[in-house]
C-alpha cells in the first residue's frame, strides 16, 4: 500500500510539540499517530529490559504454586511451565509489526478488523480488560503495601489505606504518562534489582524444596490430562494478553532486523517467567501455597521480608505501568479525542476508583477475577489472528494507511468492518468457550464431553487462524 500524500491524523493523536532543550525526561508527545523515521531510535536489545521487569513477578510464584496444588508432580509442573511460556514467541512475532508500521498494535489491528470493527475489539480487550486488570493488580500491590506498613509498625486506618493505594497508583501513572522513553530507560535497572531480590528468595526456597515430591493423590488418565491442559492455559494466558507488544517496539528504526525485535522481546519475558514460575512450583512441594504470601514469609528471615515485599510492589508497578500505557493508546484508538497523557490519567483514575471500591467498600474482586479468567476465550483467538495477518502480509504494514479512518480508506473494508477478521474472532472464541473448563465456575459442553480436559487454547487459536487464513487471505495479501 502507498501512503496518502497528506497523512490523516487519527482521533486522539496530535502533532508533537517542538523539541525542548535539556536532558531530563519528557512526557511522550506521541499517541497513536505514526512515528516518523527521523524520530526512530534505540536498539532491539532495549526490549529485553522492557519485558523482563514486569515478568519478575510475584504472580509467577503464585501460578507455579497453583500448578502443584492442582495435583501435578514437580516434573509435570515444570513441563507445563515451559510449554505455556512458549507463547511468548507469539508476543515476539507481534512486536515486529511496530517498527514496520511506526504505529501501536491498537492501530495495526485495523488491518484485521477494519476501522470500526477494531474500535469494538479494542474497546473490549484493549481497554475494559486493561482497566479491570489494573484494578486487580493494584489491589494486590496495595494489600502487600498494607502488610509492609504493618511490619514497619505503621497502623493504617481507612485514610491511611487510601493514601497507600493512591501512592502505588501515582508511581505507576508517572511512568505511564512519561511514556516510552522512561519505560525503556527505567525497566532494565528495575529488572536487575527485582531479579536480585527474587534470586535471593529463590535461595531460601530451594533449601525447602522436596525434589522427590509426589502429590498425595497422583493423577492418572483423563484427570492428569485435564490438569496438564488447564495448567498450560493458565501459564499461557499471561503472554497471550500481550497482543499489544508493538506499542513498545514502534520507536525502533524501520530497518531494525525483525528477528532481533522478536527474539529480544520473547527472551525478555520468557526467561524470568520460566525461572520464577518454577520457583513457585519448588515452594509448593513443602509450603502451603494456597496462601502464598504467608507461606513465603514463613521461610524468610525477618530482615529480608520487607525487601521482598518492596520488590513485589515494584513488580506490580512495572506491570501496571505498561498496561496503563497501552490502555491509554486503546482509548485513543476507540475514538476518544484526548492526548495520550490525558487518556492514561483517565484510565488510571478509573483503575484507582475500582481499587478503592474493592478494598474499602465491597469485595467485588472475585467477580472481576472470574471475568478475567473467562477472557481467555478471546485472548488466544486475537493473538492467532494477529500473527496470521502478519505472516500473510509478510509484515508489510503502512502506518499512514492504517491511520486513515476516512470512508473508503485502505482499511475501511465494508462499512468500516473487516468481516473475515470479526468472523474468525467470533468462531474462534466460540470454539474456545466450548472447550473451556474452569472448575467451579464454567465448563463448556465440549470440555464436558472430553472429561473436563481444557482444550480452549489450541481450539480457539487454530479455528481463528484457519478461518482468517481462508476468508481474510485475499484482502490481507492485496
Image (cartoon, rainbow, N blue to C red):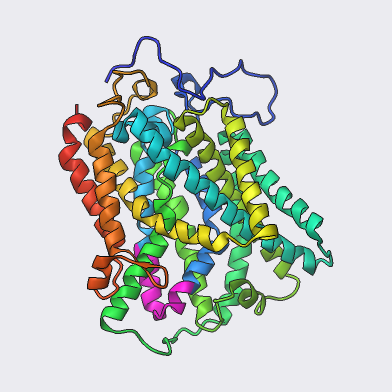
Depth check: give the residue in front, 446 or 243: 446
Q: Where is residue 395 in the image (x, y as percent from the top left)?
A: 29, 33
Q: Within the image, what quadrant is residue 97 found in?
A: top left
Left or right: residue 463 versus residue 9 is left
Q: Which of 20 and 435 is in front in this view?
A: 435
Q: Image quarter for residue 227?
A: bottom left
Quadrant of the frame with the C terminus: top left
- In percent of width and height, residue 102 lies at 42, 27
Decide: is 448 above or below 347.
below
Q: Can residue 256 be seen in this view?
A: no
Locate the N terminus by quadrant: top left
Q: In this view, does 154 lie above or below 349?
A: below
User: Who's the residue at 56% across and 19% down the image?
Assistant: 16
Predominant secondary structure in magenta? helix
Give the residue drawn at x 81%, y 61%.
157
**Measured from the top left, where is residue 387 in percent x and y?**
29, 43
Identify the residue shown where x is 40% and y is 58%. Answer: 374
Q: Where is residue 460 in the image (x, y as percent from the top left)?
A: 27, 55
Which of these two is toward me, 106 or 54? 106
Q: Residue furthest bottom?
A: 216
Q: Which of these two is toward me, 151 or 382?
A: 382
Q: Does the magenta stretch include residue 72?
A: yes
In the image, the segment drawn in magenta is 66-83
Q: Is residue 420 magenta?
A: no
Query: What residue is shown at x 29% (from left), y 57% (from top)?
Result: 432
Q: How many labels does the image show?
A: 0
Visible in this render: residue 158?
Answer: yes
Work out which residue is located at the far front of the displayed protein and give it: 362
Amino acid at each position: 500500500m502507498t501512503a496518502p500524500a497528506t497523512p490523516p491524523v487519527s482521533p486522539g493523536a496530535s502533532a508533537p510539540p517542538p523539541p525542548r532543550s535539556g536532558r531530563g525526561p519528557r512526557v511522550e508527545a506521541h499517541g497513536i499517530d505514526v512515528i516518523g523515521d527521523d524520530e526512530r531510535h534505540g536498539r532491539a536489545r532495549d526490549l529485553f529490559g522492557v519485558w523482563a521487569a514486569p515478568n519478575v513477578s510475584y504472580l509467577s510464584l503464585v501460578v507455579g504454586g497453583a500448578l502443584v496444588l492442582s495435583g501435578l508432580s514437580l516434573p509435570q509442573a515444570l513441563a507445563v511451565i515451559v510449554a505455556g511460556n512458549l507463547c511468548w514467541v507469539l508476543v515476539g512475532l507481534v512486536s515486529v509489526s511496530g517498527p514496520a508500521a511506526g504505529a501501536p498494535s491498537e492501530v495495526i489491528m485495523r488491518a484485521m478488523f477494519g476501522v470500526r470493527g477494531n474500535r469494538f475489539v479494542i474497546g473490549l480487550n484493549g481497554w475494559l480488560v486493561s482497566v479491570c486488570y489494573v484494578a486487580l493488580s493494584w489491589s494486590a500491590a496495595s494489600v502487600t503495601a498494607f502488610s509492609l506498613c504493618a511490619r514497619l509498625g505503621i497502623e493504617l486506618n481507612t485514610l491511611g489505606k487510601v493514601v497507600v493505594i493512591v501512592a502505588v497508583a501515582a508511581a505507576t501513572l508517572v511512568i505511564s504518562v512519561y511514556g516510552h522513553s522512561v519505560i525503556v530507560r527505567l525497566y532494565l535497572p528495575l529488572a536487575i534489582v527485582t531479579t536480585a531480590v527474587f534470586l535471593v528468595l529463590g535461595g531460601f526456597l530451594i533449601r525447602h524444596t522436596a525434589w522427590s515430591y509426589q502429590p498425595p493423590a497422583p493423577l492418572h488418565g483423563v484427570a492428569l490430562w485435564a490438569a496438564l491442559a488447564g495448567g498450560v492455559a493458565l501459564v499461557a494466558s499471561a503472554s497471550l494478553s500481550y497482543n499489544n507488544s508493538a506499542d513498545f517496539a514502534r520507536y525502533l528504526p524501520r530497518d531494525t532486523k525483525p528477528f532481533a525485535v522478536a527474539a529480544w522481546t520473547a527472551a525478555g519475558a520468557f526467561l524470568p517467567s520460566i525461572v520464577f514460575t518454577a520457583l513457585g512450583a519448588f515452594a509448593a512441594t513443602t509450603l502451603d501455597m494456597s496462601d502464598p504470601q504467608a507461606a513465603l514469609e514463613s521461610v524468610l528471615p525477618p530482615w529480608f521480608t520487607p525487601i521482598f515485599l518492596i520488590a513485589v510492589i515494584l513488580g506490580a508497578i512495572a506491570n501496571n505501568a505498561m498496561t496503563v500505557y497501552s490502555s491509554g493508546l486503546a482509548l485513543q484508538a476507540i475514538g476518544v479525542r484526548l492526548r495520550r497523557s490525558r487518556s492514561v490519567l483517565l484510565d488510571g483514575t478509573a483503575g484507582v476508583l475500582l481499587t478503592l471500591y474493592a478494598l474499602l467498600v465491597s469485595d467485588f474482586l472475585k467477580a472481576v477475577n472470574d471475568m478475567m479468567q473467562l477472557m481467555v476465550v478471546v485472548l488466544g483467538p486475537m493473538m492467532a489472528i494477529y500473527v496470521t495477518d502478519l505472516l500473510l502480509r509478510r509484515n508489510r504494514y503502512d502506518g499512514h494507511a492504517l491511520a486513515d479512518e476516512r470512508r473508503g480508506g485502505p482499511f475501511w473494508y465494508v462499512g468500516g468492518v473487516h468481516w473475515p477478521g470479526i468472523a474468525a474472532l467470533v468462531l474462534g472464541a466460540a470454539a474456545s468457550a466450548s472447550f473451556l473448563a474452569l472448575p467451579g465456575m464454567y465448563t463448556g459442553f465440549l470440555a464436558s464431553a472430553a472429561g473436563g480436559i481444557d482444550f480452549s487454547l489450541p481450539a480457539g487459536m487454530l479455528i481463528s487462524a484457519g478461518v482468517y487464513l481462508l476468508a481474510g487471505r485475499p484482502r490481507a495479501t492485496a
